[in-house]
């Protein structure tokens, strides 16, 4: 009986490793593809499900408090969020990657980020998007397709608006 359990456990481990290897070789989610469905629970306890957000442009920003290159874009992302907030047509979601909650909350306070942010528990969201690092931002159009992929930080507030504005027509 012990041998059967041992072999079963070994086969299960090999299956998990094979699946992980397959996913890593798929490469990143690309422009034009449907965005992976995910659920994000924000630090304030609100739940956001991507399928429920169809009809809005959704900006999904992967970041971390330890990420130095995330800091320059933090204020621009917040400014863009505030710019679009009155229209209700654009939702920004911050996905905190491999971080601790106290440091993440301190980062959000330091950069006065008010749009919803939450932890990527067990890296499920980042694995679904197959990110390569932080910051990375996926702009999802109203139909749920990835319209823009930003690897690395945005250079300016104007750059962000230039990507989102055409998606609102």
Image (tube, helix red, strand yellow):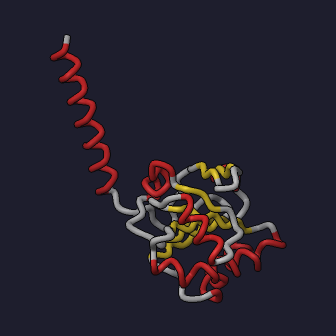
**Is 9 above or below relative to 59?**
above
**Is 25 above or below relative to 153?**
above
Pick the residue in front: 137 or 62: 62
Tell me where residue 81 appears, x and y as whole percent: 71, 74
Left-right relation of 24 to 60: left
The residue under the point 54% across, 84% down is 72
Q: Quadrant of the C terminus?
A: bottom right
The residue under the point 71% across, 51% down is 46
Left-right relation of 6 to 134: left
Tell me where residue 121 appears, x and y as whole percent: 50, 50
Q: Residue furthest right?
A: 86
**Is 76 above or below relative to 66?**
below
Tell me where residue 1 appears, x and y as whole percent: 20, 10
Q: Quadrant of residue 143?
A: bottom right
Q: Residue furthest top?
A: 1
Tell me where residue 4 appears, x and y as whole percent: 19, 16
Pick the residue in front: 34 or 101: 101
**Is 2 above or below relative to 133?**
above
Left-right relation of 104 to 109: left
The residue under the point 62% across, 76% down is 110
């Amino acid at each position: 009986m012990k041998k059967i359990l041992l072999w079963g456990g070994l086969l299960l481990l090999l299956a998990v490793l094979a699946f992980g290897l397959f996913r890593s070789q798929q490469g990143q989610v690309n422009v034009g593809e449907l965005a992976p469905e995910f659920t994000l629970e924000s630090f304030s306890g609100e739940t956001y499900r991507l399928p429920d957000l169809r009809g809005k442009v959704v900006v999904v920003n992967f970041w971390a408090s330890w990420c130095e290159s995330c800091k320059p874009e933090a204020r621009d992302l917040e400014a863009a969020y505030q710019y679009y907030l009155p229209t209700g047509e654009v939702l920004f979601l911050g996905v905190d990657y491999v971080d601790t909650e106290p440091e993440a909350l301190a980062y959000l306070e330091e950069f006065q980020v008010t749009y919803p942010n939450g932890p990527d528990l067990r890296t499920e969201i980042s694995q679904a998007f197959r990110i390569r690092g932080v910051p990375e931002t996926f702009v999802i159009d109203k139909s749920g397709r990835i319209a823009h992929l930003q690897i690395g930080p945005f250079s300016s507030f104007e750059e962000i608006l230039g990507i989102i504005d055409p998606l609102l027509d």
